[in-house]
Amino acid sequence: MRSVHSIVCVKPVPDPEHWEELRLDPDSGTLSRQGIPIVLDPLGKHALEQALRVREARGGQVTAISMAPPQTQEVLNEALAMGADSAVLLSDPIFAGADTLATAYTLSLGIKKLGDYDLILCGSRSLDGSTGQVGPQLAELLDIPHLSRATHMELGTDGLLRVRAKIENGYQVIETNLPALVTVEKEINTPRLKSLMGIVAARGKKAQVWDSEALRADRERVGICGSPTWVSEVSLVAIERRGEMITDPSEEGVKTLVETLCALGALPSAAHEEPCEPETS
Amino acid sequence: MNTRNEREVWIFAEQRDGRLLDVGLELLGEGRKLATELHGQLTTVLLGHRVQELGKELLAYGADKVYIVDKPALEKWRCEAYTLALGKLVEERSPEILLLGATAVGADLSARLAARLKTGLSADCVGLEIGDEGQLLQQIPAFGGGVIATIVCPDRRPQMATVRPGVMEKPPRSQGHGSVEVVDMTLPQEKIRTEVIEVCEAEVEPTDLPGADIVVAGGWGIGSSEGWKLVQRLAATLDGAVGATRPALDEGWASEEQMIGQSGVTVRPTLYIGIGISGVMHHVVGIQDADVIVAINNDPNAPIFQVCDVGIVGDYKEVVPLLINQLKKRLNREEEAGF
């Protein structure tokens, strides 16, 4: 029985607990993320958990990989603390501004540089970008099959991979042979918490950092240069609404609300047929 | 470069078990507008096995041309098989634009195909337009701040985009004027490395949410499944449907079909009431066609108050029971009077 080398793609994202603090910089049109903690993307954690379970069942190793700015290295330490054997951060100023295709290309170079692998795991979509494109695009660039939206996964000793894949109103059960890429849904497992032992063990490990030179990257295919899509304009959405505010949440305030809705004709017809004037006693 | 009259707008029409999905027809409506602006043709691609009779249906929804690839290898949805077939057609015939529905199938297929063609792809667009230089302007809500980002793909073709079901409107059915071409091609078995063992699709239970006249939605601010019952009670009082934001879905209070927003359902009710919803753009794009938007939130600075008709600042646990009471009085009195 062969052991399995799993590679898990993880993504540092702004902590969703702090999303309310994200503000648009009106001058640059970019989001200000200053002071917002960076965490491991939630579905990436499920992908990592799945890889750790494969290692427990079959032996082998787990490598976490990410393309991100250097200051996100601590997020990879979290992956190490959860139990990954090693971690690689693909980081270079020229990787900035990458769309999903340039990201998938960069990740594919990192994975090729890692050498032999059997299984690649990713979250089915990230919390922030949420396109779900990088997984399938990475599989295409590596020329391996991919199975999307797994809610259940079994790996036979013969290298046959069986996945239950979520589709609208149901699922498909699909099989393929390793090497393959799987994107996971949250139903697939419950990620373990990092243990004290894991945190201590992770201190001895450190994420390797590979830049464009280490990857021998084609500069025309990474970052903003390598991205076929561009953001041409960011505009504030002009939504014209009445914007009436009621600051009194008591019986009186609610009455004002109901009467306003009545006047706007927004309530079911039974309510409309009632006279909408305030009741007089 | 394509010359003007060669510009084609392609729509991928998804079928499951020989039935066309509405999202493909909705895209035909949108594709017609784009094709007219480009002075180009509207073409539909249909993949499957024993699906040729659906060609006429696609013509009736406005396609100038329908390409059908009808092969046993395409009988069940498999990403590699579909990518192979659609990729070959695109490479041979060079469309300017390729639109797909953002379903489980369309999202997966579009991503793998865009990587094969080394072209750009934008997911879950809420608006599509043709720019001054004939490029496709793809509008996507940018996370967090009430902004729409316009994405372009200046140099590569086709320009690819996906759109969620229900975002565009289905065009009326007509006589149809176009032609159907069954395209023969070989799909080498060794390039399709996955096997479908089982498919389980429940009879589609259409949720009443997309067509609901009144929608009551709850978000992260509800805080507990106990609190969620108030959202449901208010909806029941108004005979409306219950909607949710992604955090509410993640908390397990609501099901996936109830999620409103860019990656969920678009609603067009007479009245929308959002409770404990902060109002991030991902959600707001799904409610902007509502006639009247009401927001209930205890944070006076919540962005939802910027996009509502009437907002009430307060603890929903106090406001919603009062509201239910007053509405009940109003509705019941009328019922009693009527009988």
Image (cartoon, coloured by chain):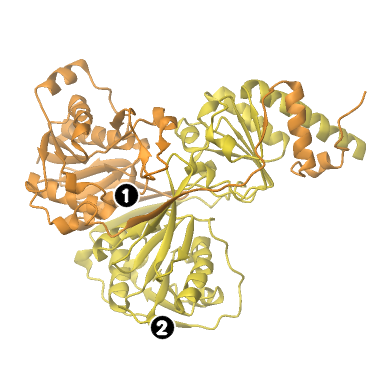
Chain colours: A orange, B yellow
Name the chain under label 1: A
The disc label shown at residue A148, or none: 1
Q: What amino acid type should be assigned to the residue bearing mark 2? A: Asn
Give the x, y percent position of residue A6. 16, 40
Between the residue at mark 1 and the residue at mark 2, the CA separation in whole angstroms equals 38 Å
Q: Residue at x 7, y 52 (%)?
A: A216
Give the x, y percent position of residue A21. 42, 30
The relative height of residue A102 versus residue B47 in the rendered view (above or below) is: above
* Callout 1–callout 2 Cβ contact below 8 Å: no
Of residues B122 and B325, the one nearer the viewer is: B122
The disc label shown at residue B230, or none: none
The relative height of residue A125 versus residue B2 in the rendered view (above or below) is: above
The relative height of residue B212 versus residue A141 in the rendered view (above or below) is: above
Q: Secondary structure at mark 2?
A: helix
Q: Secondary structure at mark 1?
A: strand
Name the chain under label 2: B
* Quadrant position of residue B339: top right
For residue B339, say whether it is visible: no
> In which quadrant will I find the N terminus of chain A?
top left
Asked whether the residues under marks 1 and 2 belong to the same chain, the reply is no
Q: Determine whether, in the image, residue A9 is placed left or right of residue B48.
A: left
Give the x, y percent position of residue B230. 63, 27
Check the image and name the residue furthest to the top.
A196
Q: Nearer the viewer, mark 1 or mark 2?
A: 2
Q: Mark 1 packing: few (<14 Cα in 10 Å), some, or many (20+)?
A: many
> In which quadrant will I find the C terminus of chain A?
top right
Question: What residue is shown with label 2?
Answer: B5
